[in-house]
Each structure stands twice: as structure tokens, then as C-alpha cells.
Amino acid sequence: MTGREIRNLLEKQREFYKTGATLPVRFRMEQLRKLYASVKKYEIEIRDALKADLGKSGYEGFMCETGLVLSEISYMLRHTKRFARRKTVCTPLAQFASHSYKQPVPYGNILIMSPWNYPFLLAMEPLADAIAAGNTAIVKPSAYSPATGRVIEKLLFECFASEYVAVVTGGRAENAALLDQKFDFVFFTGSQAVGKEVLRRAAVHLTPVALELGGKSPCIVDASANIRLAAKRIVFGKYLNCGQTCVAPDYVLCERSVKDAFVAEVKKQIKLQYGDNPLANRDYGRIINEKHFNRLLGLIDRNKVVVGGETDADTCRIAPTVMDGVAETDAVMGEEIFGPILPILVFDDFNRVVEDLKEKEKPLALYLFSGDKRHIRRVTAELSYGGGCINDVVIHLATSGMGFGGVGESGMGSYHGKAGFDVFSHTKSIVDKKTWIDLPMRYQPYKNRFYETLLHMFLK
């Protein structure tokens, strides 16, 4: 799609939004029901597209993408009416007589830019939130997941008129053309590098943005942890989607006294969950493309591999891999891994771990496996990160009742459920002042001592 076509498409959406058609809650609910029905209709095609793009099994595709989208739409259908209501707030006595309230209203015309690692979920879930909030939207799927992008385009073209919800496919040229336009809000999920460019381009128009980025999410395992269960859950979260998950445990910080037992359990769990030959497991995914496959190969130090390390260049697959004896200076610690490689570092002093993490960039997620309440309190209270789990990994992003998002280098803004409705809304503060009385104390001339005394009483 050319820049002119994109500009014309956005102009049509502006004109449609100005009609007020998206504002009634009844309209929003109707569109959410249509979206739910369309996702159900194309469920098989979505499954096949995820398999083609990322090698995802049908079970994993539903558990981590289609099912979560349906869950979010259902949540919005149950709660949008309540979310959209005005909220009365207390009015100071000095403003007597009046009614003060907060009114959520849509931003207007939204751009949603989604990534390739969860190409259906991370396009459709924010779209459901944007629709619930009363916006129009242009969805831009990643060019790296073309099969899923085609299904999204087909589904949304059938479901909505383009002046309401539209899809723009393509690569960098289309991304640049979209960012040249003045949207009312931009929602981006992807890498830190591209997120910086989105923020820079949006700043030209003073457009607010939500950035869902990533980073090196640490996973701490201390001596009080249930080692068997920790290994089981970390293996699940790390190698889900072949490690291409923004909230996957990037590396493990394991207390030295339990490190050997932990590594032994991780080995056992990889075999239990993926079999003796993971590359022959049809339910195990693949790396998105050759570029990322080769990047990951450069992060593997063969001298430190204790599990896995097998690769298949023809299918861009890397077996679940564990590296032991890793140091902060190793290549694998220099960037977000975003693949099935798990480095294990050791520590002796938990307090030192906390202080060291305070000096690092703020991650999208942080995980702690521990039975020590003091350790849990320190991590949850003192460290800054987007979100996380105690004694589990990844699952915090699947709860519509909690917002999901980053902080600092890992992003800004959050969504899911109520937070998703809020991120696509502007909340107006309104005072409805009554006309049957007009207190004179605020008007000049300021010479009446009685009114001055009265004003002091009202403002106390």
C-alpha cells in the first residue's frame, strides 16, 4: 500500500470517527461480538498460519494466541458497559453547588503495530481493547509472519468496514508511511530499537504511544526454592514458542548451593517435555527466519553447553539448550536472547543479586523461585520491572484482571482488561456547575473580610 493510499485510508477513518458512530456502548458491543464470531470462524486457518510461520502446534497456538484473544474479547463483552460509565468524584465545598466526574472517551484513530513472535495474539488483543474503548483502528501485522498476516487481513476485511477497522500489510516502507501520519494514539509491540524509532516519529505529531518492548528478564532461584518444580516451570516458559517470547526467562541466577541439583532437574525436564530428540518433536516450534537463526548460533558457547545445542539449518530449529558456567561478559549476556538458549549464572549472596539488578536496565519481567518471604518482599518491593511471578513464569500476562506492560527500557503503558480499555481512552475531568446559586467569594474586588474568612473555611 502506498503512502497516499494509507493517507486516504486514515482520512476515511477520521471522517467516520467524527460521525460519532463508535461512541455508543451498544455499537462497541456489537463489534466485539462480530470479532469473536470471526475468530471462531477462522480458528483452523489461524492454527495453520501459526504453524506455517513459527511451527506452532495447534495446542500451543490456541493456548497462547487464539484462546487468549477469545478470552480478552469475552472479558470486554462482560465489562465494557461498566468501564465506559462516568465516575463521580468528590467535589470541594468551595465549588458548591456542582457535580464533578471523570468521563472516559476514545482517543480516536489508533495505529496498532504488532510483532511476529505472537502474530495473532499481539495484533488482535489490543484491537479488542481499542474497539471496546470506542476507537477506529489500523492494524499493521509484521512482515516476518506473512501467513498469519494474511489471515488477519482476511478476517478483519470480512468483519469490518475499512473506515472503521483496516489492515495494512507490507514491510519497512509501509511502516514508515504509517508513522508519517498523525494518529491519535500508537500502540507498538516489538524490539527496543524499533520502539525508539516509533517514539521518535510519534513525537513529531505529539502523539501518545504505548510501547510493549522486551529486555533481559532475569529468573532467580534461591536455596529455599522447590527445585524440581522450578525447573519444570522454567523449562516450560523458556522454550515455549522456541524461546521467542518477550517475557520468557532470559537467564537464570541460581544460588550456588543448589545449582547442580537445578541443572540436573532442567535436563530431566527438557527430556520429559520435549523428548530424547526435540528436533524430531512435531510440537516444538522453529526460529522465525534464517537471520535470527544465525544470530542465535552466535550466542552459543559450545564449551559451556550442558544440554542441547543441536541445530537444523534447513528448518531453522535449535534444540532446547542450556549453558552452565556463564559469566556476565559472555556474548549470550550482551543482548536479549529471544531464542531457546538458557544461560545459568550462580550467586552466593542474595542481597548482592538485588543490588546488581538495581543497576541493570528495567526488564519486562522478573521471576523469583523462593520460599523465603524476606527475599520475596525485597524483590517485589525494591526492584523495578514490568511484571512477573513468584514461583512461576510467564503466566502473569494471561490474566485479564491485571494490566501487562513494561517500565523504563522495557516499555511504557499497559493493557489487558481494564488497563486495555484505559490505555486506549482519555479520561476527561468535568465539573458540572449548577446555576441556581453563585457564591460571590471568588470574584473581585477582594476587599470583603467576611468572604475572605469564608473562603479560608471552605478550602481547609
Image (cartoon, rainbow, N blue to C red):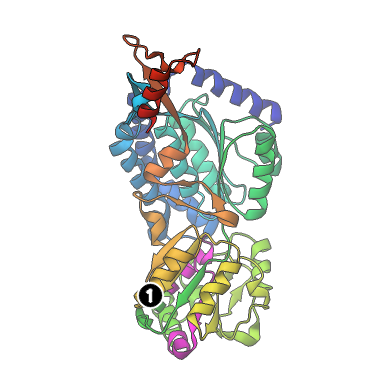
Query: Is 18 in front, or is 4?
Result: 18
Quick check: 14 above or below 297?
above
Read off the magenta span.
234-263
Q: Please state, as top left, top right, bottom left or bottom right, where the N terminus lies in the image.
A: top right
The answer to which image quadrant residue 10 occupies is top right
SS assignment for the magenta stretch, majority: helix
Does residue 400 appear left or right of residue 206 in this picture?
left
Residue, x 44% and y 78% (percent of image)?
221
* Amino acid type, residue under disc 1 in the picture: Arg
What residue would you read off at disc 1? 374
Extreme-left residue of the structure: 78
Q: Residue at x 39, y 22 (%)?
A: 431
Percent position of residue 292, x then y: 65, 63
Q: Toward which corner of the image does residue 235 lie, by quadrant?
A: bottom left
**SS assignment at label 1:** helix
User: Residue 252 magenta-drawn?
Assistant: yes
| Percent of width and height locating residue 224 | 37, 83
